[in-house]
Image: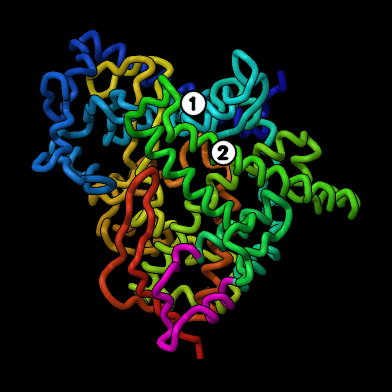
Amino acid sequence: MIAIKYNGPIMNKLYMKNFIFATEINIRLAHSSSCRKIKSWKEIPGPSSLPIIGQLHHYFPGGSLYQCNGFEFQEKLYKNYGPLVRLNTVYAGKPAIFVFDPDSMAQVLRGENWLPIRPGFDVLYHYRNFYNQPKGGAPGLTGLISDHGQKWKQLRSLVNPIIMHPDNIKLYDTPIGEVAQDVVQRIKDLRDEDGMITKNFDYLMYLWALESVGVVALGSRLNTFNENLESDSVVRRLITLIHEFFAISENLDIKPSLWRYYPTPAFKRAMKVFCDIDSITRSLVLKAKDELSQRGHSADDKKGVLEKLLEVDEKIALIMAGDLLFTGVDTVGNTMSCTLYLLASHPEKQNTLRQEVNSGDERKSYLKACIKESLRVMPVAGGNIRQCTKEYNLLGYEIPKDMFVVFPHQYLSKMESQYPRANEFIPERWLVDKDHALYHGNAHPFAYNPFGFGARICIGRRIAELELESLLSKIIQNFELEWRGPPPTMYQSAMNYFKGPFNFVFKDIK
């Protein structure tokens, strides 16, 4: 077994802090439980149930949760039932507890931080661990989004120092900036005489996100902006397959499905999608490996992420290329669309950002604040989830081991009690002094959690931030953004999708 370092003393202190926190919580709970009886999780408030169909009638026409999703869904749960809400069929038809109390969130997330189990992508887990694998499952590592327990811990310890190290990501400033400049040119080519791009703007953002993450994960440009790409080209196939991956996650992982009992047509299609993605990823990584061999090894301080992963193990490089592609295209593409919309809708904020970008201020304080505020106002994910590895006492209710606990950060990050003027786009809240009413530090630290928490924080966070900062800077330097017409529609499934009609106007800066 490989020793787990997690960046040495820093991470050890973090885990010790979490351990002490969890111990203090348990002591307080032990004292409080002697004073009052702990209730069963089945007594947690939630929508009423009927025989046989349970809570399903609330989702039918006329029901309180009919066609309700995303923020509206979370809001109704909180306002109708309070800080803890019991839903009997949430994740793959199993019960889950929605936690709107930030202290309870902290209790569970910190308590589960050593070997956290984050449900989701079960069908991908099945594919990587059991599909065409030896009896008993895959013997080795399969991926950060498909492994749990010791296997996940071993893989994370191998890749953390490479993918999360700031110096390694700085190597991509120039190539990712070149991708951003290509997007600027593509916008100029696609806009009409009024400066508008009314069709497929989301697809352009997906192409940019794929091109950018490909620079890191695959070690080279994919040339996604090539107008002559055939519909069956590797790049277009990869974009289509990654979109389908998220649709698969919603239909097979989140919604009740029979694939766990027999191979349904949707399950067979999922296996084909994953096989195709693996095949494409493998061919691209091996191509990059050959190019590295021909070029010769780089100096240690010039080695990119892929080269360093290949030095660890070729299989690790393949696994991480797949994970970065799975999680780094739709998420980053939609975040950029939302950020551009918010800036187009707030010209005074846009002007402030342009002044900073043009000044060459290397701190990029306002740029980073705009991205943070965008992730708060229009997050790409509705929240997070854990499967408990032990029992918890949350607000007087016993939460048993193996229960799914959902953390609806999308709603908490827009609560007035956490962020005053919560529905407004105010990047300044991330910059003002502590004594200011809008100071973000007045909110509970677990109210806003766009990249996850603790040991399971998003491995690609630094990559995503670099991509977003690079493209946003280039666009603001070159264009004055406007938005004409009604607000965009948001399609909410496994994640929040920014959908048309697209009413962006890109005017050249004079």
Residue that lies at the very extreme toward the front in this rendered image = 265
Q: Is residue 122 left or right of residue 414?
A: right
Task: Specify the segment rendered in magenta.
Answer: 183-203
**Does label 1 or label 2 sit earlier along the sequence?**
1
Pick the front one: 408 or 293: 293
Name the residue furthest left: 62
Magenta segment includes 190: yes
Q: Residue 42's mark?
A: none
The spot of residue 290 in percent (x, y) is 84, 49
Q: Judge from the rendering whether residue 411 lies leftward or rightward of residue 77; answer left or right.
A: right
Pick out the residue farthest to the top.
34
Say if mark 1 contacts mark 2, CB within 8 Å.
Answer: no
Which one is nearer the viewer's eye here, 51 or 303? 51
Position above or below: 194 against 251: below
* Kind of residue at disc 1: Pro
- Quadrant where the N terminus lies? top right
Q: Residue at x 60, y 45 (%)?
A: 324
The reply to whether residue 349 is in sight is no
Give the labeled residue for mark 2: 274
Q: Which residue is mark 1?
A: 116
Residue 422 appears in the figure: yes
